[in-house]
Image (cartoon, rainbow, N blue to C red):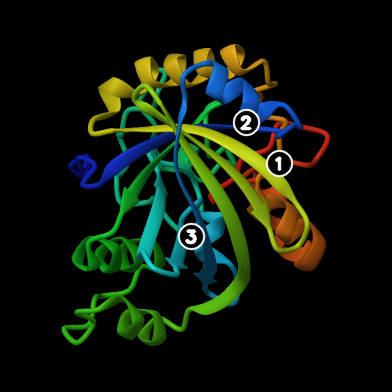
């Protein structure tokens, strides 16, 4: 019997990454961007020892000063199991996916320069989604995420500090990040509340990238991709093989 398709319960982040150059900030100011602030924060990511969350394109993060967040694919993909949306869910191109196609190794994100992820921050929603992905019945005692993390046997697999300068440009945010392992990258992003708003948001993000004069393509590696490639190469290769990430020679996807 076909399951009901769940409506997203968190905001949807639409973003594109680009390489930061020496004139990036000057170009932002020229376009009318306003510096919103500069911060430093530590990110810690969690998964099962065998990587079932990330293989299902789910990224559980604790950010210093902000708390817990679970990034989920907006459209269902294969992995540990269907990410809570059920067989019969409609993909971005309007086609209906069955249980077989969900586990066929399809890319986690549609091809292109932008990505779209549902962001869950409510403890109830985060724990429910984790239990769905891992096929575990939620424990009544898992009212807070740290307790659920321990109960589900999740372990930290990545941790790094980021220095960030954020600009506001119209309704978009432009982040210029430098990680403590020596990698810098920029992000143009916005947030919407419904999947129907994603295509317009993608167009706007891409347009701003063009105005900045930067290459906003899927080939730009994010912080997480570089971190895993350097420090957890086996995990990285597993994600490449499952098409949750792709090799450095092909368009990259990232969840940071």
Judge whether 236 appears above or below 23 on screen.
below
Indicate the secondary structure of the residue bearing disc 3: loop
Q: Tell how many labels.
A: 3
Across and down, in percent, residue 96 comes to: 35, 26
Q: Nearer the viewer, residue 93 or 193?
A: 193
Across and down, in percent, residue 4 comes to: 18, 42
Question: Residue at image x 25%, y 47%?
Answer: 10
Residue tagged by mark 2? 25
Q: In which quadrant of the rendered image does the N terminus lie?
A: top left
Label 2 close to label 3 by CB (< 8 Å): no
Question: In the shown orientation, is residue 97 left or right of residue 229?
Answer: left
The numbered disc on residue 14 is: none
| Mark 3: few/some/many CA within 10 Å (<14, 14-19, 20+) | some
Q: Is residue 233 visible?
A: yes
Q: Nearer the viewer, residue 163 or 153?
A: 163
Closer to the N terminus: mark 2 or mark 3?
Answer: 2
Closer to the N terminus: mark 2 or mark 1?
Answer: 2
Residue tagged by mark 1? 221
Q: Nearer the viewer, residue 142 or 135?
A: 142
| Mark 1: few/some/many CA within 10 Å (<14, 14-19, 20+) | many
Residue tagged by mark 3? 80
Separation of marks 1 and 3 at Cα, in angstroms: 25 Å
Indicate the secondary structure of the residue bearing disc 1: loop
Label 2 close to label 1 by CB (< 8 Å): no
Separation of marks 2 and 1 at Cα, in angstroms: 20 Å
Q: Quadrant of residue 192?
A: top left
Question: Residue at image x 71%, y 33%?
Answer: 19
């Amino acid at each position: 019997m076909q399951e009901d398709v769940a409506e997203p319960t968190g905001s949807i982040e639409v973003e594109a990454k680009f390489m930061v150059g020496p004139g990036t900030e000057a170009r932002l100011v020229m376009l009318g961007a306003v510096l919103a602030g500069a911060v430093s924060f530590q990110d810690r990511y969690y998964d099962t020892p065998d990587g079932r969350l990330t293989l299902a394109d789910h990224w559980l993060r604790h950010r210093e000063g902000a708390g817990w967040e679970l990034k989920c694919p907006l459209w269902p993909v294969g992995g540990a199991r269907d990410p809570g949306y059920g067989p019969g869910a409609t993909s971005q191109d309007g086609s209906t996916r069955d249980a077989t196609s969900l586990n066929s190794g399809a890319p986690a994100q549609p091809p292109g320069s932008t990505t779209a992820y549902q962001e869950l921050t409510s403890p109830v929603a985060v724990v429910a989604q984790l239990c769905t992905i891992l096929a575990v019945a939620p424990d009544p005692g898992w009212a807070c995420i740290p307790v659920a993390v321990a109960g589900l046997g999740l372990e930290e697999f990545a941790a790094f500090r980021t220095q960030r300068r954020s600009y506001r440009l119209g309704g978009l945010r432009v982040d210029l990040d430098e990680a403590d392992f020596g990698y810098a990258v920029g992000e143009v992003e916005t947030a919407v509340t419904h999947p129907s708003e994603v295509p317009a948001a993608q167009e706007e993000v891409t347009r701003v990238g063009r105005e900045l004069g930067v290459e906003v393509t899927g080939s730009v590696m994010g912080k997480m991709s570089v971190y895993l490639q350097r420090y957890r190469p086996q995990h990285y290769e597993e994600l490449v093989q499952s098409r949750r990430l792709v090799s450095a020679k092909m368009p990259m996807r990232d969840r940071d």
